[in-house]
């Protein structure tokens, strides 16, 4: 009975890890070996794909561009969502509930709906092929989600803390940054994580709004065709390196995410 208890979790973990292992396995093979047949381990172990990615500006700048606009989007989304979430949590005004849920409707529309309007708008404003363009486009989806998550965490903080701080002579900016934000630090961590993950994996808007200077790694990966076909080993290595930033972020915010689930807001 004791062994059966571990059977299901073990099979579940193996099922989840198999695609990652296979991607890692393919990244150390040549394209010919990948197409040649099935094998659990590389017959001719090679790191040429990783060397090319880390030395070719076309490849490694794709990662740099992605990190830049993802970081921009995360900072902008959290910065705008914090005061908005505080207002929704602490104040009551006409149509507040309707406005709150109307913001979330942006999440119900696929990014493809906004690709053409964003392309025309940013081309007219001279923002096409910039990191800022992609970051702003992703804000349309991330800010409503950030407001929703943060509003739940802020509502969990007693109003008496606000009143006590005002009685002690704190200005609102000082109270918000020195007292309130540390109290909802876990909420900010969870919000930043979800903003990061959406912006990191979103492809359509990032590919549509960039061309050369700000092209993300996902767009680079879709253009690896050569005269002999797709370089599968190179694609696999790029996939492995693409997973790493997300894994690092999850590691650092794992406790915040667990707290968010415990509060029932994530």
Image (cartoon, helix red, strand yellow):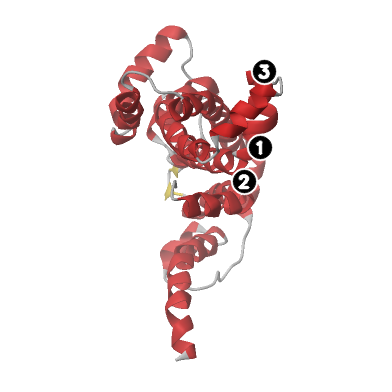
Q: Name the residue under label 1.
A: 182
Bin the neighbour count of mark 1 within 10 Å (Cα to Cα): few under 14, some 14-19, many 20 and up: few
What residue appears at the point 51 percent right and 55 percent down from the top-left corner? 233
Name the mark on residue 171.
Answer: 3
Across and down, in percent, residue 163 comes to 60, 27
In this rendering, does residue 49 appear at all?
no
In this rendering, does residue 7 appear at all?
yes
Task: Indicate which disc, 2 or 1, sits on the residue closer to the N terminus.
Answer: 2
Across and down, in percent, residue 178 comes to 70, 29
Q: Are marks 2 and 3 in contact (CB under 8 Å)?
A: no
What residue appears at the point 43 percent right and 72 percent down from the top-left corner? 12
Q: Is residue 252 above or below residue 111?
A: below
Observer-nearest of 174 and 75: 174
Q: Quadrant of residue 94?
A: top left
Q: Is residue 133 above or below residue 148?
A: above
Q: Are marks 2 and 1 in contact (CB under 8 Å)?
A: no
Disc 3 secondary structure class: loop
**Viewer-nearest of discs 1 and 3:** 3
Disc 1 secondary structure class: helix
Across and down, in percent, residue 107 comes to 34, 34
Q: Distance between the residues labelled 2 and 3?
A: 54 Å
Across and down, in percent, residue 179 comes to 67, 32
Name the mark on residue 52.
Answer: 2
């Amino acid at each position: 009975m004791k062994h059966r208890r571990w059977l299901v979790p073990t099979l579940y973990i193996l099922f989840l890890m198999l695609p990652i292992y296979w991607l890692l396995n393919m990244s150390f093979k040549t394209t010919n070996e990948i197409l040649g047949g099935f094998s659990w381990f590389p017959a001719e172990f090679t790191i040429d794909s990783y060397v090319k990615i880390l030395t070719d500006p076309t490849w490694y700048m794709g990662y740099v561009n992605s990190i830049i606009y993802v970081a921009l989007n995360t900072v902008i989304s959290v910065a705008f969502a914090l005061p908005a979430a505080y207002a929704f949590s602490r104040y009551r005004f006409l149509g507040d509930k309707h406005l709150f849920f109307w913001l979330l409707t942006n999440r119900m529309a696929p990014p493809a709906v906004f690709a053409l309007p964003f392309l025309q708008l940013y081309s007219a404003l001279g923002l096409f092929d910039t990191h800022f363009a992609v970051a702003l486009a992703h804000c349309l989806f991330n800010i409503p989600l950030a407001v929703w998550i943060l509003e739940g965490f802020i509502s969990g903080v007693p109003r008496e803390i606000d009143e006590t701080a005002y009685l002690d002579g704190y200005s609102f900016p000082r109270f918000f940054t020195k007292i309130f934000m540390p109290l909802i630090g876990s909420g900010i961590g969870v919000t930043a994580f979800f903003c990061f993950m959406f912006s990191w994996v979103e492809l359509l808007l990032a590919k549509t709004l960039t061309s050369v200077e700000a092209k993300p790694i996902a767009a680079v990966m879709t253009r690896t065709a050569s005269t002999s076909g797709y370089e599968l080993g190179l694609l696999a290595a790029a996939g492995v390196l693409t997973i790493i930033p997300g894994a690092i972020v999850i590691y650092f915010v794992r406790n915040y995410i667990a707290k968010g689930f415990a509060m029932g807001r994530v």
